[in-house]
Amino acid sequence: MDPQPGDRADTRTEIRDFLASRRAKITPEQVGLPTSGRRRVPGLRREEVAVLAGVSTEWYTRLEKGHISGVSEDVLSAVAQALQLDEAERTYLFDLARAARPARRTPSRRKDVQVPPPVQWLLDSVTMSAAFVRNGRMDIVASNPLARALYAPMFDSDTTDQHGRANLARYHFLDPGAQEFFVDWQDAAHATVALLRAEAGREPNDRALRDIVGELSTLSPEFRTMWAAHDVRIRHDGTKRLEHPEVGRLELTYQSMDLPTPHRTVHDLTLYTAEPGTPSEDRLRLLTSLAATRSQETRPTGQRR
């Protein structure tokens, strides 16, 4: 089984596997190197990466084995450039490097913090977009009525925890209905795993994250395969197609943004909306009406207007 986030030894293994996986994706032609004879490995050889990064083969070999202590940021940048890492992958490599270095003191534990009431007020004020806040482990920690209506199959799923909290990764991989709900399930699943992988780089000692990765690795062959690909994603935006059980097919655009929170907690605000004048907008309006009606019905009598 692929290593899960954890101590520095696990981090060294992750550095090794991550660099090897990126190296395998690049051909000599892509970086302007000559090719000759049969190649025993896909992508670049270690010595070719070393040449591109301006370091010795022995040095790069040690780095790819996870021996990253004492490596300067300039050298890491050169390796990142040689491997053509994108912004998310580069950030991930630097996160792994920090985690692998000997700590001068015990690292402070990241604390889970409650979503401040003004954030919930903001979510509730958004009426024509589904809005929710998730943490780095993909837990939904706050949402507006339309988001709960849009993602009703997930919120009603057996994959919610004992407190009724939904988790996007658990729903994707452990609920068979997710493959019907997400029209492009494969793409959505890859993005979910890549976001979790980035979080593992930021917080390698997060026990709750290790538990989620371990659970999904044990129960889902699809997750195991995607996790082993070492793909990384930080930003999450684009188009999503959903087959909603009440209003039918929806094609929505979504955009995510970071919410500033204390104690290094990652809170990500995501909004889904439909293009004006499309059938998806009409269906989202219908879902908005249904969500508002249900919200009124569940309020105590004295609070209804």
Image (cartoon, grey):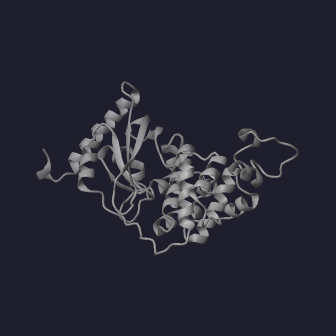
Residue at (53, 59) in percent of width and height: 95
Given the current orientation, which residue lies at the most extreme bottom position? 105
Q: Is residue 28 left or right of residue 246?
A: right
Residue at (48, 44) in percent of width and height: 181
Looking at the picture, tell me which residue is in the foreground, 296 or 234. Answer: 234
Q: Is residue 106 left or right of residue 5?
A: left
Number of numbered labels in the structure image? 0
Residue 30 pos. (x, y %) = 71, 39
Given the current orientation, which residue lies at the most extreme top position? 277
Q: Could one spot residue 232 in this view of the protein?
A: no
Residue at (26, 51) in percent of width and height: 120
Residue 248 pos. (x, y %) = 43, 36
Q: Could one spot residue 236 in this view of the protein?
A: yes
- Quadrant position of the C terminus in the picture: top left
Residue at (68, 51) in percent of width and height: 53
Looking at the picture, tell me which residue is in the foreground, 267 or 160. Answer: 267
